[in-house]
Image (tube, coloured by chain):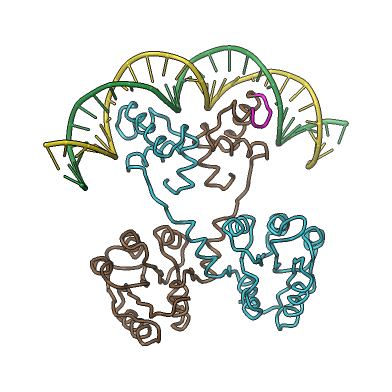
Chain colours: A cyan, B brown, C green, D yellow
Amino acid sequence: MKNETIHIAIVEDDNEIRQTLTLIIDGSKGFSCKYAFPDGESAIASIENLPIDVVLMDIDLPGKSGIEVTRHLKQKCPQLDFIMLTVQSDDDSIFESLCVGASGYLLKDTNPADLLVHIKEVYDGGSPMSSQVARRIINSFRIIDNPLSDRETEILKMLSKGMNYKEVANEIFLSPHTVKTHIKNIYSKLHVNSRAEAIYKAIKQKLI
Amino acid sequence: MKNETIHIAIVEDDNEIRQTLTLIIDGSKGFSCKYAFPDGESAIASIENLPIDVVLMDIDLPGKSGIEVTRHLKQKCPQLDFIMLTVQSDDDSIFESLCVGASGYLLKDTNPADLLVHIKEVYDGGSPMSSQVARRIINSFRIIDNPLSDRETEILKMLSKGMNYKEVANEIFLSPHTVKTHIKNIYSKLHVNSRAEAIYKAIKQKLI
DNA sequence: TTCTAAATACCCCATTTACGCGATTGACAT
DNA sequence: ATGTCAATCGCGTAAATGGGGTATTTAGAA
């Protein structure tokens, strides 16, 4: 736990929300908010040279989206932490935000006191998110259902490592013909018709 | 928000912790804890026929690990929610827990009042986790670094959808020869020598 | 300015793949 | 007992792939 003042910047196009947040944060002990931007372009132009620890980023911005802006800034300033602040909590927004480097994802109805707590959590290396958001993330780890038999899964894994018919056959003491048949069945079960597509689908569905 | 009493079961080998938790939970308004098991085997034997909403699951159990037990039970009772309760927060434990269907992941130093709040969150469809745990999950979404050019990434994505040389070439108005060259370069950059392996590696490294 | 990387295009050729067909065995469920 | 499914084995062929080259243009970095 560090005890210095946390320096915050806000990127938010709604004037009222931006000003309210700025006032609340800057008026709180241990927090400073001297920079607020109404759009991503101006934030990108300024933030990399400012002494900022945490950025509150709206997702719905005019021009570049908050996600794009975050991708850009995180690349230039990897030490900067980003909290996405948004009204929507659809899966795509959440995952894209996380993929471009956001550390937290909060809904705009989060109350000010909690918001300050969450900013501190991010500053201390945590990743605050509402438990609804967390649930969506967790669900992405679950396996839907696996139509493949054990043997098929085993073979598909070997294919993903770049092995061909013969190599797989030797590895598990089968005839290459049998391996072929298994692969055919895999394709049919996954509704694909090439190795590449099979592996792609299998990974996306967490079968391998 | 539902307002019925939440029925909880505990699986925990340490007698003191188990009894303390049972007393705390069962003594709280809106919570009931009539079932506690010292190991996974006895939990598996009983839980599927009990009127339980949420299971608190220790990970370090004698015999079957809490993760194994969760996998087993979640398969039989998909509507049951599991909160992992553990001292360790290593990446593997977290991911495995989520993969087998746990909804929350809390450290044992969570204080009792918070624990009750988290149980309710799970019951209401959320996924409580400490912000440290959340951070680890979030980090797993980040991209390490991408050796591929934009064009190469574009082509690799098409390959993952099962397209061949010609189809890719037609799609982006190139000669099939050029597509082939790009693919060769992709293989070389990823240190692979087949489409299958390239796609596997690319996904694992979040390049596509 | 010089060098490098990316994107583009082409050739040859051996190997691999995908798909068409058919078949047997054993296990497990109805 | 009958049926389905997984797992095993086989053949033939047309198409696709991967590896080896070479070469031009353009844009950006050193």
What type of secondary structure mainly makes up the magenta span? loop
Give how far across and how far down residue B98 sits, in percent.
44, 61
Q: Is residue A130 above or below residue A28?
A: above
Q: Is residue A67 above or below residue B2?
A: above
Q: Residue at x 75, y 69 (%)?
A: A9
A7 sits to left or right of C19 = right
Q: Is residue A127 magenta?
A: no
User: How many marks overall?
Assistant: 0
Q: Which picture quadrant has residue A105?
A: bottom right
Q: Quadrant of the N terminus of chain A?
A: bottom right
Q: Is residue B174 magenta?
A: yes
Give how far across and how far down residue A73 sits, in percent.
73, 58
Q: Quadrant of the C terminus of chain A?
A: top left
Taking depth in this image into account, of B25 and D28 the one nearest to the observer is: B25
Give the magenta-colored segment's residue range: B170-175
Q: Which picture quadrant has residue B149?
A: top right
Q: Which picture quadrant has residue B155?
A: top right
B56 sits to left or right of B127 = left
Give how far across and how far down residue B22 sits, in percent.
33, 82
Taking depth in this image into account, of A181 and B86 the one nearest to the observer is: A181
Give how far across and how far down residue A164 sits, in percent.
42, 30
B49 sits to left or right of B93 = left
